[in-house]
Image (spheres, helix red, strand yellow):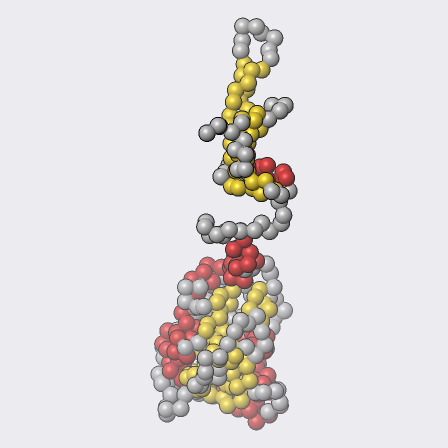
Amino acid sequence: MARLESAAKAGYYRTPPAVARALARHLAPVPHRGRQVVRLLDPCAGTGEAAAHIAHALGAESFGIELNAERAEVARSHLDHVLATSAFSLRLAHGAFSCLFLNPPYDTDDEKRRLEHAFLTSLTRALCPQGVLVFLIPQCRLVLSARYLAAHYADFAAYRFPDPDYAAFQQMALLARRKGRPTPAPDAEARLVAWSQDDLPPLPEAPDDAAAWTVPAVPRGDVLFASLFFDPLQAAAEARRRGVWAQPQLTEHLWPADEERVRPLMPLRRGHLALLIAAGLLNNVVLRHGGQRILVKGRTHKVMIPVETDDETTQIEREVLRTTVMTLDLMTGALETVEQGSETPRVASPATP
């Protein structure tokens, strides 16, 4: 029944709030400057409350991954960046995160491999050197990852969940610091194997001494954090943030201020000018050609024209659009009207003063 329940929840069991609060008290950011930031990654974010609590305590920028779309939507209200995808279908910057908060599904994949170990080996690359791992797993499963942990991490501390939370899955919290490069450590491996069976002390509400686990800072700026699959919502958000529509050079041309004179992106052809004039968009504009200066006004209006029919007792009319362009020569005062359908323009002589 427990396996069926786990499958129904997609392997999701949230971190108990008391455990999240206690872990937050065990972590502290190192002092850093404005060009640095603390980043926390939770690849099994659920609804995001646990990661958000720890990130708030660290003053960290929070990143979450959640396969379930509904939980991912809730997590977006708690975390800074959330992807609704699998943690194994991800483009992720190496060494860009200060803290890896890992509470993976307690289950096996299709090839009968334990997911706790698969998440650990896949996501370790995201941690920076000296970055802190917070690994929440059933205590008996620690033996499966002991060799990998000993090679890639150091400075271990292990606690079981406090009562009554420990009774559910006999979970433990392992804190460790990532090494600069992997090196075998048989003694650390043996200690981790023993912890998978020994009675561990419960996770205290606060560290025993004033020294908390210090979480390093990383360079500030954008990091690679994207799904391998196309997400239209993510693509739209990225386009609004950094796409061509966000470039001021383009938006100034497409949406200039009303009072600002603009230059078209491409030179206008005669057909373009004719359409602008006919639509009235160039009314009261002075055009210059050589030494001639004319004032232009255009108008498009509807007229009714008769339609021939074989029935002499029936009169049929059709509505059509007619365009009229009027020009005033500012040198001579001559007024010229060009109407659609007329063979010759009408020219009115200037009035005699």
Q: Taking the image as drawn, is residue 19 in sight?
A: no
Horizontal side of 158 relative to 148 (left or right) equals left
Q: Nearer the viewer, residue 318 or 298?
A: 298
Q: Where is residue 142 drawn, in percent x and y?
A: 53, 82
Q: Where is residue 46 drawn, in percent x and y?
A: 46, 67
Q: Where is residue 265 drawn, in percent x and y?
A: 60, 51
- Report the number of numbered marks: 0
- Tell me the residue at 53%/71% (across/down): 222
- Tell me the residue at 57%/81% (across/down): 144
* Residue reaching furthest to the front: 353
Horizontal side of 210 relative to 82 (left or right) equals left
- Tell me the residue at 38%/82% (across/down): 25
Q: Quadrant of residue 121?
A: bottom right
- Tell me the residue at 41%/72% (across/down): 52
Q: Where is residue 245 drawn, in percent x and y?
A: 54, 56
- Would you place residue 187 above or below residue 297 in this image? below
